[in-house]
Image (cartoon, grey):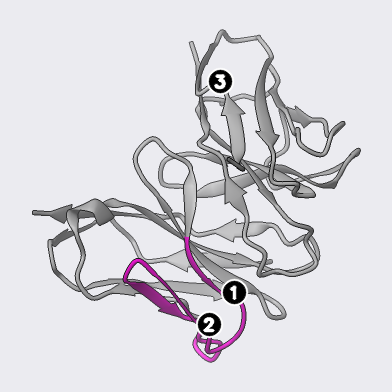
Amino acid sequence: GDSVTQMEGPVTLSEEAFLTINCTYTATGYPSLFWYVQYPGEGLQLLLKATKADDKGSNKGFEATYRKETTSFHLEKGSVQVSDSAVYFCALRGGANSKLTFGKGITLSVRP
Amino acid sequence: DGGITQSPKYLFRKEGQNVTLSCEQNLNHDAMYWYRQDPGQGLRLIYYSQIVNDFQKGDIAEGYSVSREKKESFPLTVTSAQKNPTAFYLCASSPRREFTGNTIYFGEGSWLTVV
């Protein structure tokens, strides 16, 4: 079945540091890939998505490229801010029922 | 404003009681979902519905029940058969499923605690 693997956390960075959060997936066919963000006590918000190989999703300074050859969708940001502190989930959607399959999430803390 | 409304935000339940979590959306979406979130385990799918009067079990449906009598509503009942119901519950919706790139939108969640 479909699965998503995220790097282990938590991650703590200083403000303005470079961020990479790794995400790899296993799926049949051609899934769409998503990054969601969850701020404390809230629901999930879509951060960015990519629907086919080599697409790059971007939003709020975050980027991720759909790499079919390495089955990866790593999230990057050049300069993180304290306000980026949250839990980040990688997810894929594909297959007959098109449910979202999530990774376990990773907590990012950014220090001033 | 369009969106997904979940209620209540916080709910306490005594052991042996059934409780129902409400989820309403005004996005005109066909598909609706319930996910459960536990620390360190990501989100797991409980039930989903692609159309009114139809729904399917997700990965962890035991101890839960749903109904889909109206397009905009998808309530979740946590029954006394659910052995470990304390969790954060998230309702979601999306346009019809044919295109996998359709975004799934989430509500603000409901915290359920068994006391």
Tell which subunit mark 2 falls on.
A
Q: Residue furthest right?
A: B53
The answer for how far apart the CA atoms under marks 1 and 2 are is: 7 Å
Q: Which residues are magenta?
A: A47-70
Could you say whether the residue bearing mark 2 is in a helix, strand or loop? loop
Pick out the residue farthest to the front: B1
Q: Circle 1 is placed at which residue position? A: A26
Instruction: Give yes or no for contact between labels 1 and 2 (Cβ–Cβ under 8 Å).
Output: yes
Q: Which part of the image, by quadrant, shows the N terminus of chain A?
A: bottom right
Residue B58: in magenta span: no
Tag nearer the camera, 1 or 3: 3
- Name the one closer to the observer, A89 or B14: A89
**What is the three-letter code of the residue carrying label 1?**
Thr
Chain under callout 1: A
Mark 1 residue crowding within 10 angstroms, few (<14) / some (14–19) / many (20+) = some
Query: Considering only order in the chain, which callout, 2 or 1, is on the residue closer to the N terminus?
Result: 1
Residue ID for mark 2: A71
Q: Residue at x 63, y 58 (%)?
A: A100
Q: Residue furthest left?
A: A112
Magenta residue check for A60: yes
Q: Residue at x 36, y 45 (%)?
A: A39
Q: Quadrant of residue A18?
A: bottom left
Q: Contact (CB < 8 A) between labels 1 and 3?
A: no
Q: Chain of mark 3?
A: B
Labels 3, 2: one chain: no
The mark closer to the camera, 3 or 2, is: 3
Type of the residue with mark 3: Pro
What element does badge 1 sit on? strand
Q: Residue B20 location in percent, x, y? A: 68, 20
Q: Which residue is mark 3?
A: B8
Foreground of the two, B3 or A3:
B3
Q: Residue at x 27, y 56 (%)?
A: A84
